[in-house]
Structure formats: C-alpha cells, structure tokens
Amino acid sequence: MVTRNEILGILGDYRDLAVVTVCSHSSLQLFHGARQEGFRTIGIAVGNKPPKFYDAFPRAKPDEFFLVDSYDEILDRADELVAKNAVAVPHGSFVEYMGAKNFLKLRLPTFGNRRVLSWESDREKQREWLEGAGVDMPKRFRRPSDIDRPVFVKYYGAKGGKGAFIAKTEKEFRAAIKPGQKYTIQEYVVGTRYYVHYFYSPLLEDGYRLSRGSLEMLGIDRRDEANIDEMYKLGAQESLREYGLYPTFVVTGNVPVVLRESLLPTAFEMGERVVEASLDLFGGMVGPFCLETIVTDRLRFKVFEISTRIVAGTNLFISGSPYSDLREAGMSTGRRIAREIRLAQKEDRLGEILS
Ligand code: ATP
C-alpha cells in the first residue's frame, strides 16, 4: 500500500489542483461539481478516443481526457497524473475496475482514507465494523445447512447487485451458488429499501457535530433493479423458473425518495455511530458514504451494506436534494467533495482528507 508519507511528499509539490476520476458511475456529477468549485478536471477513459456522450453534457465534460488501454495501466501511469497535480476521486467503478489491491497501491493523492477499503470489501470485517457500531444488520447464516427461511446470497465486492440471489432452502442455495467465489448469506429482509447518502467532514465544526468534525445528509435514493422489481407482476417465482426466468438485482437506475421525518433522527444516529467506530478502527472514513438499508413495518432500519465513497444514487441530486438544500442550495455530493478539497487546501489540511 502506498504510504502516507509518500502521498504527503507528492502533495508538497502540488499547486493548481485538478480532480481526476474514471469516466463512469458518477463522473458527470463529479466533474460538474469540481468545476463549480473552480478545479480543472481530468477524465480517465479506456480506448483510443474520448467517450462521445460527454459532448451532450458540456457543463460536466472534463477539461481533459486521459486515455488508457486498460484500467491496470492507471497504476503504471500515475506519475503522469501527479505531474498534472491531480487528486483522484474514487467511485464504485473506479475501485472495482482497477481492483481493490491495485487501488491501494496507486501513487496518487486520493480523496478519502484508503484504509477503509479493507473494512468494506471483506463482508465479515464490514459486519464487525457496523455491528460494533451498534447498527442493526440482517441475520447472517454461517453455513448453507443453517438456512431455515428466505435468505439473500451475495458475493464479495461492489457488483451493483450482479449475481445475488434469493434462496429459501439449502437445495435452492446449492442450485444457484457459483463455485470458487466468496459469498455471504443473509436473512432476506422484507421492507422498503432506502439508500441514505451521508457526508462526513473531519474539517467542519458546525451543523450535526461528531466527536471530531460533522455529519451531513445529502440525499436518499432507491434503486431500480433489472427485473426483480417488476417480476411480481407475472406471478410467483417458482413457476417463473419453469420458463427459465430468474430474478436479478442488477442495478439499472435510481429513484429519489424521502424518509418519514420521524425516521431522520435514527438515520443520523446510525451515520454518527458508523463514523465514530471508523475513527476508532482505522482513523476514520472521510467524505461521502452510503448506508444501504431496509426499513421494516416496525419502522426498524436493517443495514445490509455500507458503501464508503460516492454512490451512483447521488446522481439524482446534481442540483441539490430535499436534504442538502436545507444546508446550501444546489449542493451535490460531487460538489461537496470538491468543496472539502478546496477547504482543506485553504487551511493547509489536505493531508487530513487525502490518502
Ligand atoms: P453494490 O454495488 O451496491 O455494492 P452489491 O453487489 O454489493 O451492490 P448489495 O447492494 O449488497 O449488492 O445488494 C444488492 C441488492 O440486493 C440490494 O440493492 C437490495 O435490493 C438487495 N438486498 C441485499 N441484501 C438484502 C437483504 N438482506 N434482504 C433483502 N434484500 C437485500
């Protein structure tokens, strides 16, 4: 893993910062937000010519493209990005495409604390962190033979729901599981899904205060998931299997939602506990994170996953959200990240938010 001193050394020579990210996921929002805060922007794209779709969105088109043959190449060409005084802003696809191991080796100042990755990408460690923080999670089944109710099975890593499936018995589990991949089995929670977008600033000392810094809520979404969301219209899953139709959870888009206002205090307490636990465990997460939750009919939150960087659901709120507007109108998560970098730069505290 790249060391803190190496990153501090690189930052020592930085002057006019640029924001760089991979051209996918939430890049439009990130480039737009960075530009609003006065940063130059660089988009990493695979191929021999820039992706055309940015031409349709001039306010979110990066100032410059950095073309690579494959995502692996980013690691070897990091020096070129350093020469451009670039700060990387990771998103789910950036980390997934490069691979978490390579991402940890990237010799480029990166927004957030990269130590969070080992706690997030291993589902056992993620549970240790979240449950240790006092957050309620779906029950875990250690062995397939323990399955005694509907369960949800998913593989390690952020796959946008790909490959995940529901099983009601051990037999169904055995029929669907792909060999050779790490997985986790959770109780299938019946309720409404809310993906809550938080932002933790170690720098700000106003608003919703934590032991250090403060916590913001920038929005909430729910995901559209390929065919599972609509399949019920055709009847029971068992009979659909006879026709070769299997439900999938692959994300295809996002819809905005708001929570019952009486649930907001709990949502904040959950975010607060997760940040405080992260400060104790690995020096704290920085910036955006998302608690992926299901609210049951008893109005209890079950957190089935944490994403510790910008999530694509924030793309809904490029012009602000019903929550972020109550702090500052028009504040997207992408812009909020850029604002944090700007603030740290002004206060000479970049080392606290980059790693
Ligand atoms: P991401 O890219 O967000 O990390 P992922 O591949 O890691 O996705 P999850 O987000 O954990 O997968 O789950 C995918 C979807 O499966 C969720 O959006 C939700 O609809 C559903 N889901 C996950 N866990 C549960 C659960 N315990 N009970 C019911 N549904 C669940």
Image (cartoon, helix red, strand yellow):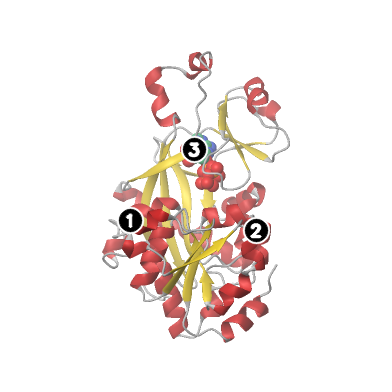
How many residues crowd mark 2 within 10 Å: few (<14), some (14–19), many (20+)?
A: some
Q: Secondary structure at mark 3?
A: loop
Q: Nearer the viewer, residue 131 or 160?
A: 160
Q: From the viewer's perspective, is residue 7 above or below residue 303?
A: below
Q: Which residue is mark 3?
A: 250
The amino acid beneath tag 1 is Ala
- Residue 136 visible within the image: no
Q: State how far apart marks 2 and 1 are (Cα).
A: 28 Å
Spot occupied by residue 28 in the image (x, y as percentages of width and height): 39, 59
- Residue 25 visible within the image: yes
Apparent side of residue 318 relative to residue 79 in the rendered image (left or right): left
Q: Which residue is mark 1?
A: 56
Residue 211 badge? none
Residue 72 badge? 2
Nearest-to-viewer mark from 2 and 1:
1
Is there CB contact under 8 Å for labels 2 and 1? no
The amino acid beneath tag 3 is Val
Location of residue 314 (image quadrant): bottom left
